[in-house]
Image: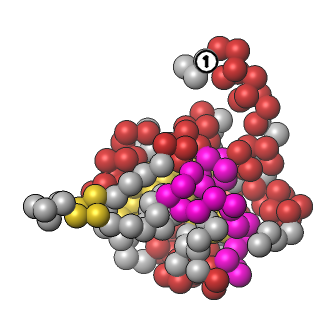
Amino acid sequence: MQKDRDAAVERAAKIKLVVLDVHGVLTSGTILYNDEGTKFQAFHHDDGFGANCLMMLKVDVAFMTRKSKSAAIRAAEIGVKNVYQAKNKLEKLEEVAAERGIGFDEICFVGDEIIDIGVMKEVGFAVCPANGVPEVQEISHWVTERKGGEGMLRELAEFILRSQGKWQGLVDKVSSKGWG
């Protein structure tokens, strides 16, 4: 299901901050336990690459979830400095926007479940992975082709950076000089 692409491009062109729910967005939502009861979640390599592409071109990335040690570990591993653990995502995002001096029209929020609808209705660019629930897909400005936990942030990063006219410059730089 794809929404009005031109409107999505216009919204994406303004984005300065991408905030991602974790479970179902950066992970598939599957939770594994070993025999000792240790919990495991899988993150996709492509999402780390997507986050790095955004941050390299001055679009900040943050994770927002209720509680997740693994999200904080993954964020640190890929250079995401902000992991917000909040019960009320809208209140927390209001604080973040005020601290950064940015408007909600400059924020992209990625969510997949009905708990994310309130905050998604307020931001400039609401995005849902392909496996998000129908209610969230309905209110989203854009739905990715990839599912949560399957590299959807890589897809979103390219969409935002193309919308901002920055993608080809990144491709040219990385293909000629490498990542560093």
Residue located at (56% from left, 51% from top): 151
Q: Which residue is denoted by mark 1 in the rendering?
A: 178
Dot 1: element: loop
Residue located at (48% from left, 67% from top): 24
* 32 relative to 150, above or below: below
Query: Left of 12 or right of it: where is 117?
Result: left
- Residue 8 in which image quadrant: bottom right
Q: Which residues are magenta?
A: 137-157
Which is more toward the observer, 147 or 178? Answer: 147
* Three-letter code, disc 1: Gly
Residue located at (55% from left, 44% from top): 46
Figure quadrant of the C terminus: top right
Q: Does 144 appear in magenta?
A: yes
Q: Does 156 appear in magenta?
A: yes
Q: Position of residue 158 (x, y in %)?
A: 71, 45
* Residue 151 in sight in this render: yes
Residue located at (64% from left, 83% from top): 134
Q: Position of residue 137 (x, y in %)?
A: 67, 77
